[in-house]
Amino acid sequence: MSAVEPTVPVSRTDEVIKGRYLALGLLILVYTLNFLDRQIISILKDPIGKELNLTDTELGLMGGLAFALLYTTLAIPVAWLADRKSRVWIMTWALGIWSAFTVVCGLTSNFMQLFFARMGVGVGEAGGVAPAYSLIADYFPPKQRARALAIYSFGIPVGSAAGILFGGLLAQYVDWRFAFISIGLFGVLLAPVFRLLVKDPPRNLYDAKPATEKPLGFIPACRVAFAKPTFWLLSFGAAFSSMVGYGLLYWMPTFLSRSMGLSLVDRSWYLAGILLIGGVAGMALGGFLGDRLGQKSKGYYPLIPAVAFLISAPLYVLGVITTDPTAAFFIFLAPQALGLVWLGPILTAVQHLGPSNSRTMISALFLFINNLIGIAVGTWFFGFASDQLKPAFGEDSIKYAFIFGLSFYVVAALLLFLASFRIKKDWVD
């Protein structure tokens, strides 16, 4: 228990403590499905592209802009609602909607139908993350939040790996439509189970200065966040890193096919292993370092990922230029881990850039910037760069697009390094 006096009766506090790990486990499961449905398109885009005769630029738009357009914009009104209504109900509806549209993806027959179905997935997933951050912040005291948020973020590598693996295997042995339909139906069935087992904890239970006013609206929350340089530095630092993260994840199956000659099944197992092992290790490391070093100095929250990005970039280049797939696999594990170290420390820092009654809205503003740039621009950029480089490098054009795009990690590291000097002044306990 935190030393802070609870703002609700002790019996309610005990109830929260007993249910926090079940809730965290189910939040991880939903987040896993969130990324599974989001990233399955990366392994399926090759058979889809062949059937629909699409360029790399078009595939990049389908994987990025189609999803991110409504996903990023709707996340803000959803966050406003989550500060006022049941966060669990919002996430239940979100899970049901994005899963249903995943089913629809498998029923489409042309590019535009699939494009709009992917927009529908984005509509649902807009309600799947910011409310979860708020729930975790109310389930766990400040000294445990970086680890809790990092553990929650295990859903990213686990879901991404599952999407790559199951999507690739189902596409190979059945077809890409069946992959969408079967995974979407699982989410539709999970939604009522989630609603039944997860409860909304009392708000602001562990805050040193619990909010006494109603949740902030959009404009007041913007005033709080936008007035703080740390918000901009963290948001754009994370966004530039996400351009690399989402871009590499989306285009890595294409790289493994064109530059390394791996089959659909082989690259599914290959990439799933990298995502799962490297991703979980990186998030665990980030959460551990964030909680341990962040207690000593707030500057460590952005400094830890800044250093990780600077180490990750050259390691990725080494993996990309390695011609032996086995050697490249083990090289890729390290930068994959380091590229995801940021989640626990940065998400924790964002939770403390305003009073507790603005927490969900500020998280949504952060996610808007991060995802709009990371997903919409990142996946498009690598596809566009690949098309531009194709006349010079042919099938290896995606390899050189990777090398060029890794410079965004350096930009991210610089922004987060600057944030480490400012964050103490902008921090709210």
Image (cartoon, grey):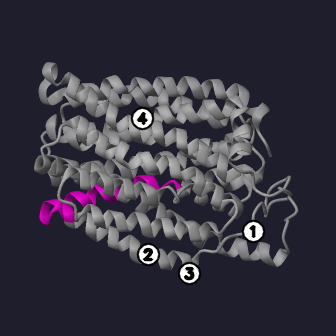
Residue underneath mark 4: 243
Q: Residue at x 52, y 70 (%)?
A: 92
Q: Amino acid at mark 3?
A: Leu
Q: In what quadrant of the picture does the N terminus appear?
A: bottom right
Q: Position of residue 238 (x, y in %)?
A: 53, 36
Residue 202 numbered mark, or none: 1
Is 171 situated above or below 202? above
Q: Residue at x 50, y 55 (%)?
A: 126
Residue underneath mark 3: 196
Magenta range is 153-177
Q: Position of residue 151 (x, y in %)?
A: 55, 56
Q: CA distance from mark 2 to mark 3?
A: 10 Å
Circle count: 4
Q: Is residue 320 left or right of residue 235?
A: left
Contact, mark 2 vs mark 3 (Cβ under 8 Å): no
Contact, mark 4 vs mark 3 (Cβ under 8 Å): no
* Residue 175 is inside the magenta segment: yes
Residue underneath mark 2: 190
Magenta segment, principal secondary structure? helix
Residue neighbourhood size for the residue with mark 3, other residues' Cα within 10 Å, grouped as few (<14), some (14–19), many (≥20)? few
Viewer-nearest residue: 330 or 264 = 264
Is 394 situated above or below 56? above
Q: Amino acid at mark 2?
A: Leu
